[in-house]
Image (spheres, helix red, strand yellow):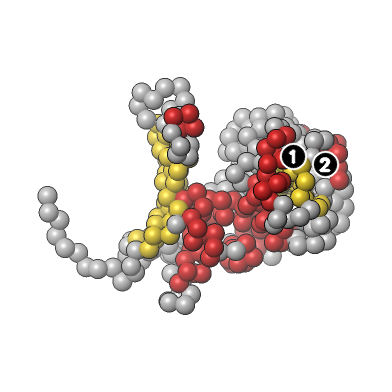
Amino acid sequence: MVFPRTETTSHPLQFIDADTVHERLDYPTLVEGLKSAHLNQQSALNDLLISQPGSGSDPNQLFIRSAWESGGSLGTKIITIFPNNRNHTKKPTIQALFILFDGEDGSPHAVIDGQALTALKTAGDSALGTHFLAKQNISTLLMVGAGAMAPHLIRAHLSMRPSCQHIKIWNRTAKRAEILAEALQAEFPSVEPVDDLAAAVSSADLISCATMAETPLIRGEWLSPGTHLDLVGAYRPNMREADDEAVRRGTLHVDSRETTLGEVGELIIPIKNGVLSESDIVADHYQRCRGEHPGRLSESEITLFKNGGGGHLDLMTAKILMGQLNKNRRPPIS
């Protein structure tokens, strides 16, 4: 079939690879952009998950996450999850693309490497939490988990709190913490792997967790006054990284109520246990960025931030990236 010719779009479609994403968007710029973006009305969100028929108990899946701003841009992230890739191919288990569209005429603006965009979005989300919730002059950052997100989170947090002098990494498999610490040594000379999680938690000013834990790793009794706890992993209803005592002792903040309440085990489980109620969530990014809540209230306050992610953050990050790429050519899209 031959399709009729259509008018050429006024916005040439751009293909943006992972290297370009990381090279052209730094965390201070991203966080400032996210602060501004949260002044706007919340986007409409929708997620769709499809499993490949006949692919077994650990199925191949297609995950589509979309967001549409009120009167503005729209975007969708298309993610494939092929668990057997780890055993049979050299390709990643998770692969993704993000497509950014114009909100006025529906024309596509850009196709962006989805894994790179997700890494920046996730770390930037947590960094925005740190901007409002961590003490200004911290000395020690503890990274719990040594997976793919760990180096991005370390860089993002330190961009908000450059006073940090010590970086510690703990991982359930100690060797992975050692490998990551060695890889980051040139960039962060003070980084070191640690074995004693309880001692590391007690001595940290800022703790960032990015794990697949189903049993809590962080115990509330270990937390020292003034600590900020950033919870990134545990994205399914049966997962959690911090126990009930941590939730009880801390002041709870989230990025978005829509993507956390009823969605993540970090909230579902303590609510079920009677330790937490929905009203215990003090504020989200929208409230903090609009000045409706200041964030940290005292030097001794223990703050908890649950990073729930969401398609709106993918869209915000993509627009900020495009603004950086196009600032010398034309204004960023509306």
Q: Which mark is residue 170?
A: 1
Mark 1 belongs to which amino acid? Trp
Observer-nearest of 124 and 283: 124
Image x and y of residue 309, in percent = 57, 48
Q: Classify 156 as above or below 202.
A: below
Horizontal side, residue 35 vs residue 332: left or right: right
Q: Residue at x 47, y 66 (%)?
A: 322
Q: Classify 57 as above or below 256.
A: above
Label 1 crowd bin: few (<14), some (14–19), many (20+), radius 10 Å: many
Q: Residue furthest left?
A: 1
Q: Classify 54 as above or below 213.
A: above
Q: Which residue is mark 2?
A: 200
Q: Residue at x 48, y 75 (%)?
A: 327
Mark 2 belongs to which amino acid? Ala
Q: Are marks 1 and 2 in contact (CB under 8 Å)?
A: yes
Q: Residue at x 44, y 29 (%)?
A: 88
Image x and y of residue 179, in percent = 68, 41
Q: Residue at x 69, y 61 (%)?
A: 159
Observer-nearest of 32 and 94: 94
